[in-house]
Image (cartoon, helix red, strand yellow):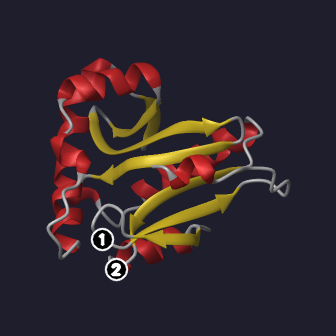
Amino acid sequence: MIIILKATNKDIEAIDKITKQAFIIYQQKLNSGAKVAALSETKDDIALDIKTNSIFVAKFDDDILGIIRYKMLSGNLAYIYRFAVDSSNKAIGVGKQLLEFVFAKLTNNNIDAICLHTNTEYTTLSRYYQNHGFIINSVCEKKGYKRGLFVKELSKNKNYDLSPALKM
């Protein structure tokens, strides 16, 4: 049975491995010279992220199968980043469980929306997020590729400001 737990410093090695593995593929899908920041992240960066933001890991026994990170951009808007599943554990529902865990956690905390950026030309990934209730709000190329801001509303309030996400 897969369980989802808050990441600790003992998870850093696996978080680093899975993140790099996923974002190497992401980098290849860009078809541009753009550099993906996740690939230059250090283990010290991950340790700081564990302290300052929300990182959760999906585990089976002691193996980490996937990770999801989010941070609050405002009182009612969260932002997912560096979400990844180990390549040997794709298509078994790990990503879905991580997303649903975060959606439930944020909904229980009365957060109105969650958003993320991804390469809109990486169609498999774009469709994945759309299949999980995200809609494309906007697209920009400030990082050297077509990067969409995807938003999922978690409440009917629609009382959130996306401007902090547009700066990401």
- Going from N to C along the chain, the mark reached first, 2 or 1, is 2
At which x and y percent is residue 129? 50, 68
Residue lying at the far front in this picture: please name it.
Answer: 142
Amino acid type at image mark 2: Glu
- Please determine whether, in this image, residue 41 is positioned above or below residue 87: above
Question: What is the quadrant of the N terminus in the image?
Answer: top left
Residue 24 visible? The answer is yes
At which x and y percent is residue 99? 52, 52
Residues at marks 2 and 1 touching, judged by CB atoms closer than 8 Å: yes
Mark 1, Cα crowd under 10 Å, few <14 / some 14-19 / many 20+, is: some
- List the residue tagged with mark 2: 121
Which of 74 and 49 lies nearest the eye of the viewer? 74
Amino acid type at image mark 1: Tyr
Residue 101 visible? The answer is no
Which of 18 and 90 lies nearest the eye of the viewer? 18
Which residue corresponds to the image point at 29% horizontal and 22% vertical from the top-left?
47
Mark 2, Cα crowd under 10 Å, few <14 / some 14-19 / many 20+, is: some
The numbered mark at residue 145 is 1
At which x and y percent is residue 128? 45, 72
Q: CA distance from mark 2 to mark 1?
A: 9 Å
In this rendering, the label closer to the viewer, 2 or 1: 1
Is 31 on the left or on the right of 136, as rendered? left
The numbered mark at residue 135 is none
Which residue corresponds to the image point at 23% horizontal and 72% vertical from the top-left?
30
At which x and y percent is residue 108? 74, 38
